[in-house]
Image (cartoon, rainbow, N blue to C red):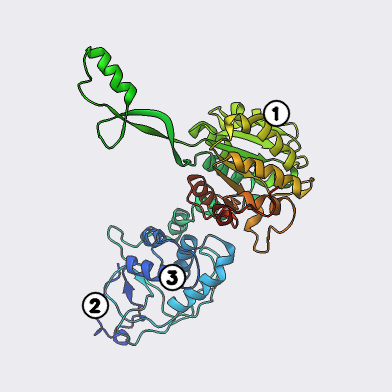
């Protein structure tokens, strides 16, 4: 255990190597996460708590171990490594001032005071356990850390094994990774997460009413007359009722053509969760439209998806958006399925038909639905612009346009379904009574 004997201790007299200052693990974690965020990395505040816990689990005896502990906790993508290396070098390779005895060495504190020279280290230290030359004679070594309940005497092998506990969680990595870049095992995990998402549509007033004790509600004439008949005289009291609120219907249309294949397997799992949780209506389309509500109603996701694949023989085929929208409106939408509903279309907008045909069918769907949301995974690309083709023709009739390319992007989809998403470009024009440019 490392003890602080005060600044009056003379290192040269006792022939002890100079020791770096000790700082509380919580303070170091908060300060370093703040520096990482200021450098431009999207690091959540709970990472500071994870880092403090990791420093208790893995007491770093050398700066290399501190580097790798911080990196596995705070870095979740390869692109973040250069920024992390630069911040780590600026924070921990600078001169440090003495601080109160605590947990972690190497953090600067005020007021500044002379400190021992920093060891000669690379900007990116080697991984713990790798073959690296030992320190030169006379080079100061980082001490083992003293934590409450720990003696700091764990062997290097045990420390390396405990490093696994501080690795970035798989769920956090899957949140920001595009579905097209996932492995088969990661796709299976994302499908499980997507099916468990909680969805809710906006509320609307139903025609059904329920009794209310407040006279601010509407007078329920029928209930009042029935009460008078039962009593045989005038009604003893006036009865009031309010209209009930209920959730709007949710209709999901998923493009399963060849261009959407990297994403459709996750989107269909999202459909399966919506069907089982909120009673949504699910359709898939490629060259033709297929209703899969009954097939996806099974609680077993694997069995539900297997039945869905059998029911849609045109899976991974071409795309006929206009024809599939026409069939949906004619056979399902006009019969009440789309009236006042929230309709979500999962598609990249690539179609064989004339864009004017897509616009015509979207205009028909617009007159039925309460809200139309278009989910296009291509939207995540920085250079993507919906300027031509079916996507450009359909966009003026959409209330929300989101990407949905990753699990984190599904939060925008859920918000748009609730009615909290940002309006599309032409929503304000419809509100002013103007018809979009593609309308006929």
Q: Report whether residue 146 is seen.
A: yes
Query: Is 226 left or right of 66, judged from the image as shown?
Result: left
Q: Is residue 424 above or below residue 59?
A: above
Q: Judge whether 339 appears above or below 374 on screen.
A: above
Given residues 35 and 398, the one toward you in this image is 398
How far apart marks 1 and 2 lie (CA) works out to 75 Å
Seen at 68% across and 60% down, the residue is 384
What residue would you read off at disc 3?
62
- Which secondary structure, mark 3? loop
Give how far across and how far down residue 413 sits, in percent: 54, 48
Against 409, is 339 above or below?
Answer: above
Q: Residue 26's spot in the image, x, y percent?
A: 33, 65
Q: Is residue 231 left or right of residue 353?
A: left
Q: Is residue 376 visible?
A: no
Assign a secondary structure to mark 1.
helix
Which circle, 1 or 2, is nearer the viewer?
A: 1
Q: Quadrant of residue 363?
A: top right
Q: Which residue is mark 2?
A: 5
Q: Name the N-terminal-most of marks 1 and 2.
A: 2
Q: Which residue is mark 1?
A: 310
Nearer to us in this view, 376 or 185: 376
At horizontal 68% and vertical 32% (from top left) the residue drawn is 330
Front residue of 275/418: it is: 418
The tag earlier along the polypeptide, 1 or 3, is 3
- Contact, mark 1 vs mark 2 (Cβ under 8 Å): no
Q: Residue at x 32, y 27 (%)?
A: 220
Whichever of callouts 3 and 2 sits on the residue coming sooner in the sequence is 2
Expressed as whole percent of the image width and height from the top left, the position of residue 321 reads 72, 42
Q: Residues within 10 Å of mark 1 (few under 14, many from 20)?
A: few
| SS state under label 2 | loop
């Amino acid at each position: 255990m490392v003890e602080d004997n005060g600044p009056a201790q003379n290192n040269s007299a006792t022939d002890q190597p100079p020791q770096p200052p000790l700082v509380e693990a919580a303070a170091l974690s908060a300060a370093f996460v703040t520096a990482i965020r200021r450098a431009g990395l999207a690091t959540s505040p709970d990472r500071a708590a994870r880092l403090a816990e990791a420093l208790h689990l893995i007491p770093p005896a050398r700066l290399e171990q501190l580097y790798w502990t911080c990196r596995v906790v705070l870095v979740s993508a390869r692109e973040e490594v250069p920024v992390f290396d630069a911040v780590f070098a600026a924070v921990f390779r600078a001169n440090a001032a003495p601080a109160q005895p605590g947990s972690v060495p190497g953090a600067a504190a005020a007021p500044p005071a002379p400190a021992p020279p920093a060891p000669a280290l690379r900007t990116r230290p080697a991984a713990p356990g790798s073959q690296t030359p030992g320190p030169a004679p006379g080079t100061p070594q980082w001490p083992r850390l003293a934590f409450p309940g720990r003696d700091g005497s764990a062997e290097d092998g045990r420390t390396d094994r405990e490093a696994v506990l501080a690795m970035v969680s798989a769920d956090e990595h899957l949140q920001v990774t595009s579905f097209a870049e996932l492995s088969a095992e990661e796709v299976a995990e994302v499908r499980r997460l997507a099916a468990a998402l909680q969805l809710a549509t906006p509320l609307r007033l139903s025609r059904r009413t329920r009794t209310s004790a407040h006279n601010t509600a509407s007078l329920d004439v029928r209930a009042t007359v029935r009460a008078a008949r039962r009593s045989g005289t005038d009604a003893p009291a006036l009865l009031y009722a309010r209209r009930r609120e209920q959730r709007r219907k949710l209709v999901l249309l998923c493009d399963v053509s060849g261009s959407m294949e990297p994403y459709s397997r996750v989107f269909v799992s999202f459909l399966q969760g919506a069907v089982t949780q909120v009673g949504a209506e699910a359709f898939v389309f490629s060259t033709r439209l297929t209703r899969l509500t009954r097939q996806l109603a099974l609680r077993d996701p694997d069995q539900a998806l297997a039945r869905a694949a059998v029911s849609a023989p045109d899976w991974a085929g071409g795309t006929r958006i206009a024809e599939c929208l026409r069939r949906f409106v004619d056979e399902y939408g006009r019969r009440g399925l789309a009236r006042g509903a929230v309709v979500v279309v999962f598609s990249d907008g690539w179609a064989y038909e004339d864009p004017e045909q897509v616009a015509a069918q979207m205009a028909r769907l617009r007159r039925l639905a309460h809200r139309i949301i278009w989910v296009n995974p291509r939207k995540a690309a920085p250079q993507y612009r919906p300027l031509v083709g079916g996507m450009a023709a359909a966009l003026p009739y959409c209330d929300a346009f989101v990407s949905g390319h990753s699990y984190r992007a599904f939060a925008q989809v859920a918000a748009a379904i609730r009615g909290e998403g940002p309006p599309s470009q032409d929503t304000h024009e419809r509100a002013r009574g103007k018809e979009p440019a593609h309308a006929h």
